[in-house]
Amino acid sequence: MKNRCEEIEPVEQELEMTADEEKLLDELGIFGESRRKFLGHASAAGLAAVAFQLLAEQKALAFSEVEALQPTGLLENPLKVGFKVNGAARSLEIDSRMTLLDTLRERLGLTGSKKGCDHGQCGACTVIVDGERALSCLMLAAQCEGRDVTTIEGLAKGSELHPMQASFVKHDGFQCGFCTPGQICSAVAMMQEAKSGELSYVTENVRSAARAVTLSDDEIRERMSGNLCRCGAYPNIVAAIREVHTGKATDHMAITEMTMEESNAAV
Amino acid sequence: MTTKIIGEAISRIEGYLKVTGTANFSTDFPIKNVAHGYILKSTIAAGKITEIETDAASISPGVVGVITYKNAFKLTGGGNLRGGGILQEPTVDFYGQHIAVVVAETYEQARHAARLIKVTYNKAEAKTDFEKSSAEATVPRSQGRADAIRGDVTAALQGAEHKIDVHYTTPIEHHQPMEPHSTIAVWEGGNLTLYNASQIVGAVQNALAGTFGLKPENVRVVTPHVGGGFGSKGGAWGNVVLAAMAAKMLDRPVKLALTRQNMFDSVGLRQQNKQRLQIAAAADGKITALAHDTITHTATTGEFIEPCGFLSGFMYESPNARITYRVAPMNVIIPTFCRAPGESTGSFALESAIDEMAYQLKMDPVEFRIKNEPAKDPSNGRPFSSRATTAALRKGAEMIGWSKRNQEPRQNRKGDYLVGYGTAIGAYPARQSPTSARVKLMRKGNDVNAVIELAASDLGTGTYTIIAQTAGETLGLPISAIDVKIGDSTLPPAAGSVGSIGAASFCNAVSEACQQAKIELQAKSDVKWVKAPTVAELMDAAKLNDFETRVDAKPPANASQYSSHSFNANFSEVWVNESTGMIKVPRHVAVTGAGKIMNAKTARSQIYGGCIWGIGMALTEESILDPRWGNFVTRSFAEYHIPVNLDVGRIDVAFIPEEDFVVNKLGIKGIGEVGIVGVAASIANAVFNATGKRVRDLPITPDKLL
Amino acid sequence: MRPFKFTRAGQPTAAIQSVTGDAAARYVAGGTNIVDLMKEGVENPTELVDISRLALTQIRSTSSGLSVGAMARNTVTANHPLVRRDYPLLTQAILAGASQQIRNMATNGGNLLQRTRCTYFYDISMPCNKRSPGSGCGAMEGVNRIHAIFGWSDKCVAVHPSDMCVALAALDAVVNIEGAGRKTRAVPFTDFIRLPGDTPEKDNLLEHGELITSIDIPKNNFAANSYYLKVRDRASYAFALVSVAAALDMSGGNIKQARIALGGVAHKPWRAIEAEKYLQGKAATEANFKAAAEAEMKAARTLKHNEFKPELARRAMVHALQRAMKSRSA
């Protein structure tokens, strides 16, 4: 299956920087990839405010990937596995017990995917595998041979945030941000599910032939119910997704009440 | 420049990091040579470990250390830990207490080896049955929980024309932030660095310094992003100590993340409460007596009592009042602060009882509340610095369409559903805590960039953003010129993100620091300014390219002469499926008077969060102990139901404009806690209006409506 | 999780051979249950045989009905055009379970083999006859709100957690099984998952090493009038307190045949035979639905904390049957 992320056109244009902003970035020593990240970010928030964060984190990440890839200590039942992560082929030797989540986090340095429960009950570890959303905490890395994995780190195209990422910022679709990578991966994959006419438990007529559907708010809510958010950003998450899904700017306060039909179906 | 930035709906400045997966939470920091810890927990609730066999674990592949009370690093004591086992004794005080830490090269190896440890106990009789324990509850030791009595409640009740006397119960609840409590501990010589999720940066620093007998400056806490806390990350629990201890004993960095199952008995809980409410009223609707008696439990290891009766002291005028607490120790992890501790659970009882009284009086519950509004705080006679209750009730009633409500239950149907409306009010104290802040200014030509530094934290509350807004507006700089550094104990000490003190404490300190910078700069040149100078002009005049200053801000001296709170009113619409008992909350309205709102977007999100917590409290959340062992049978997200997206309908949020400069210079009252207060009662009252069933025991699960 | 050898099977026969020959070997397909159970220490295999790539993914019509491959994933099954059109009850039941992420991973075969969510089973420090035969039943005298009201024994009061299986029970599905030496057998679904009796450790009739290859669902006339209702403690992503798969074959205003199965009430999806018998040939009225539910509930035996379940099940059956009558055509 084609990677679904690639089918969504990025809407953000590369932003122009003022000379002063350029200078500031020079001064802060932010070049290359980080600079592009900045550009992507500039519309959403203050420039310098993020500089500190990026610098600090960039420094921390100086820990090289080569090192990250080295297994530490003795591996039991070691096994070689190769799969694509965010477009790049990765091959490594792992303990057969390793989940995809721990492999991403501990061996590939991709700590965006979060361990919220480690038992398939919260959705914080959601990644996109072969175009479909999946829980990386319940997937053994050993089972990923040849698969194509997209994590939160792989959604933005260089400086351009994925539209879903930009919409989450705009609509404040998070507070603490811990469940956010999982929410966004889930939402991105869900867009394709809607295009293919996939059903949910609140879909009124499940017998109809599959065709692209526009999701009601209750459909979005049900389909996102596998991603817990303890801060309670749900109304904002629904608004963020609705905007990307419909392509129309959405007003926070315009979240509609459940319709009778949907509500009946849901209970 | 006088651009208005404060209050604007600016997107979170750390948003980019959070949506790209680059925001580093505790265990995301890539530390070289890190070993992985796994905690083993007790399987008895009280007694002593008589034997702990660790050989098999120690020789299990990859294991670098097994720590039990037998070999644990001896701690100097003190440290003001919240609670949780730290392996100093063989004693067990509750089920699930930490009894060993296994450290290995990989997480998989540590987890497996921990299962190889064999433990033998000498069991003692444990107090694990709330029904039994609460029957033996006694007067608390805590001074703040002494009986508070005004007038003669008993006499007033006896002679009353209308009265109610009812009991409400709320279960144990757990905070369960999405990020489990996690630490990476790194020692470099005698210096300890903790990458640790912390709501109060300094508290964790001091607790660990105390525990290990270090000076605070030898302990550094790094916590740029906190994955939710809700009170449970307010201080240091045993798990932080275990991470630091393991790292010290093994002389290498150790990562120790609690499992989700650990989260039920390692980092506190909201205690179970039994509340008795007695209210007397005259036929005209005036309350003549109000009594709120709470029976609760604490831990055998210490006393913590959430103040369920607090709101009953000042929400309504009553000539006769009684607020009491009785407490019983139990063998459980010690209860702790949990989002609006006391106010949230207490308001369920108080505001349900008020609804019951209004129903008996055949009065509209909105009007009944307004009729009993106090002119000043009845509990201490102080004037309110501001109180938005009436305005919030009126506004909320209009927003929800209160006129659609029938006073009598079961009158409103839609298809398979009974529809009901409910309301409840609430409050939470407004306070400011001492906080220091440093401002650094860097000039390049006409541009100035500012760095704001303080050891504050952001657990999703919007701290980064509102600090940038405060500094930007005060300095007259665009928000893009402001760099906010928080979440590090090496920065100037700050209050925590707890008890709704964060915004008031941080922003007032930052505002003062920025003003101080301008004053000091002005003093550095003898230029007489005709119109207010920009910061760039001030630096130019002072011939400075770099400048920094710091203030140690304190709350206003006269704040304690007032009764200061954020106040709210909640309105809920619920649909109850008559066949299945399943409840929907298609709409909830929250109107809050919280002084100055620093950011319209993040503030609304905070209120959403409170409301959704309230939905969980009302409908889904309950932690259940099996009294035979004292273990939680609700031990994962499969059994402990926090609300999911589909549980939440439309939530409308409004703020009552307030200018309250008694609370603090900026007039910030705080919103993190007040958002949950009254929500559960509002929903329960709506369920009564829909069904005619008064559910007094939370949560209102389908079985309770059959 | 103890260390284990991981192997990938290319063919069913090879997979069956590997697992049959090793008592401590297990299959892994979607992994959504076994990986969870291994982390908890409930399952402790020394070898995992990955069967997720076996070519058992067909969903096709046969002369007698529908054949659904064991390795077809839940999402694919629920959304398959044939299933949507002719077996919407199965579609709804699958969609009522878990989350999209889990349904994307989970296979049909694995769904049948889900183990109970009884907390005493999941927590290895608790007694449980299912996990550790002879250790006792923690739930019997414990917190048993979610436990069984039908068919339980003094050894076990656990309930089966699947939603999909409730629909399969109602639809008279047949489970096709292959064992060592290419021996195959077909077992009616209603017999496949067991009642606990004295051996609650055995969830179903599979012998060690046997592999589910496919599930057959016979043709039926229920598509126009069926409904899957799930009552739970929150709106989504929670196991059922009670669920009902209801299907009616109507002739005019009368019920030619009824199929009803209940979830969350027994160690297996509970086929409501008494209710079905009652409804046969009767009018689809609320009174008849109530009487049918009443007939079924006569055999219910409650525990300390689940006394609400017969009443909830009664109401849920009536509601589901009413909803089935309102179902739409394709």
Image (tube, coloured by chain):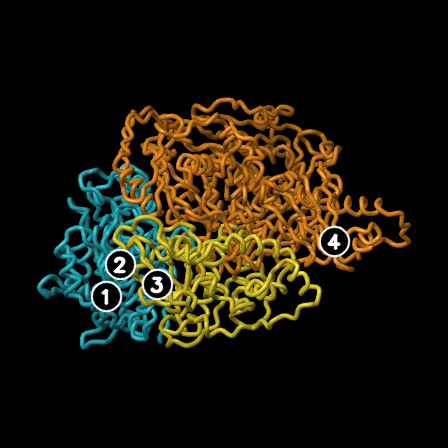
Chain colours: A yellow, B orange, C cyan
| Numbered disc in front, either 3 or 1 | 3
Q: Nearer the viewer, residue A63 or B140?
A: A63
Residue B644: x and y, percent? 45, 54
Q: Nearer the viewer, residue B481 or B280?
A: B481
The part of the image, by quadrant, that contains residue B13 is bottom right
Image quadrant where one finds the C terminus of chain A: bottom left
Q: Nearer the viewer, residue A184 or B151?
A: A184
Q: Are marks 2 and 3 on the same chain?
A: no
Label 4 – label 1 distance at C-alpha: 63 Å
Label 4 – label 2 distance at C-alpha: 65 Å
Chain containing the residue with disc 4: B
Chain containing the residue with disc 1: C
Amino acid type, mark 2: Ala
Disc number for residue C208: none
Disc number for residue C261: 2
Amino acid type, mark 4: Glu
Q: Looking at the image, do the residues carrying marks 4 and 2 touch, with CB atoms under 8 Å apart?
A: no
Q: Residues within 10 Å of mark 4 (few under 14, many from 20)?
A: many
Disc number for residue B473: 4
Residue B145: x and y, percent? 57, 26
Q: Are marks 4 and 2 on the same chain?
A: no
Q: Which residue is mark 1?
A: C70
| SS label for mark 1 | loop
Q: Is residue B356 visible?
A: no
Label 1 – label 2 distance at C-alpha: 22 Å
Label 3 – label 1 distance at C-alpha: 30 Å
Image quadrant where one finds the N terminus of chain A: bottom left
Q: Residues within 10 Å of mark 1 (few under 14, many from 20)?
A: many
Label 3 – label 4 distance at C-alpha: 51 Å
Asked if C128 appears above or below B627 in the picture, the reply is below
Q: Residues within 10 Å of mark 3 (few under 14, many from 20)?
A: some
Which of marks 2 and 1 precedes in the sequence? 1
